[in-house]
Image: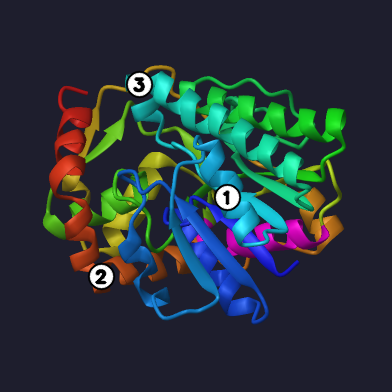
Amino acid sequence: MKNILVTGGAGFIGANFVKYLLRKQRDILVVNYDALTYAGNLESLSDLLEEKRHIFIHGDIRDQSKIEKTLVENQIEGVINFAAESHVDRSIDNPGEFIQTNVVGTLNLLATARKLGIKRFLQISTDEVYGSLSSEEAAFTEDTQIRPNSPYSASKASADHLVRAYHHTFGMDTLITRCSNNYGPLQFPEKMIPLCINNAFCGKKIPVYGDGMQIRDWLYVEDHCEAIWKVFLKGKSGEVYNIGGDNQMTNIDLVRTILKTCGRDDSLISFVKDRPGHDRRYAINFSKIKKELDWKPKHDFASGIVSTVKWYSENREWLDHLTSGEYKSYYEKMYSGR
């Protein structure tokens, strides 16, 4: 396929994927479609302004007529859907917004892609749809029952069900990937790792929910991008592929590692009231993609976090821009009293 639509391509993972794809595939046209909400940032794409193989279109995936026009005018053959509201705290504050973008938006994309005979549709999802694990339970596999616990993960699970249904009912060539927590360059600073890095740079307190013993698996974003493209090219139609980083750790150990990397000590740690319904542990089994598509992560956390801190250190202007205005007011509201 030569012409690919990437939705949500001005967001964290989407922007990294667009850059990865243009770097790896010289004969491809990437049409980047993004609503530019608070987490979408054109500055993340500034180095692509002169790239003729990259077309940016400002649009919302809930706008079915604009989606159809974009697909037709650019002769799109495949769709990769990153577009989503993705922050759990925001979903607790406003669940309806997540349903509109993550469910209704995905439905619009599916319906339009089916109408126009798009060859392949890849949905980018999350391990959070599986719910929470105890310390004794085995890692999530693609066959683990879906049991989302937040409005965000429920909206992503709903979207996944729609993608599966369009494959089963209409015969569409669809795929789903479910990843663990991503980190790396260009991540919006409300998320845990860039928030910790920014606060460490500024000597501000770093909020840690509850006892900090929640466990997550961390996946370097470039590794994720490589896996996504392998699934899009070679994945079996109708299948789900888990993508993990093989880097499980507690939140408190994560924060301490970041502080050490930034040259700060633990005095910046501030334990705050836990998030409602906070999942205790995620762990992801990615043996399927390893066996079928010969993929595994290249970065361990030790090297990945050093590269990430270095990137944020060298791009303070980008970070400062995003930590002002609307985001700053939300950030202060979100953590006050928790």
Residue nearer the viewer, 15 or 180: 15
Left or right for 68, reference 58: right
Tell me the element at label 2.
Answer: loop
Residue that carries the numbered disc 3 in the rendered image: 94
Residue that carries the numbered disc 1 in the rendered image: 69
Queried whether the magenta region covers residue 233, the answer comes back as yes
Q: Residues within 10 Å of mark 3 (few under 14, many from 20)?
A: few
Answer above or below: position of 212 versus 30: above
Tell me the element at label 3.
Answer: loop
Three-letter residue code for mark 3: Asn
Sooner in the amino-acid sequence: mark 3 or mark 1? 1
Tell me the quarter of the picture where residue 138 sits: top right
Task: Give the residue at x 55% y 22%.
Answer: 154
Do tag 2 and tag 1 residues touch (Cβ < 8 Å)?
A: no
- Spot occupied by residue 314 in the image (x, y as percentages of width and height): 26, 74
Task: Give the residue at x 18% y 41%.
Answer: 326
Residue that carries the numbered disc 2 in the rendered image: 315
Q: CA distance from mark 2 to mark 1?
A: 36 Å
Q: CA distance from mark 3 to mark 1?
A: 30 Å
Tell me the quarter of the picture where residue 332 sits: top left
- Spot occupied by residue 229 in the image (x, y as percentages of width and height): 68, 62
Task: Give the residue at x 51% y 79%.
Answer: 52
Three-letter residue code for mark 2: Asn
Left or right for 194, reference 115: left
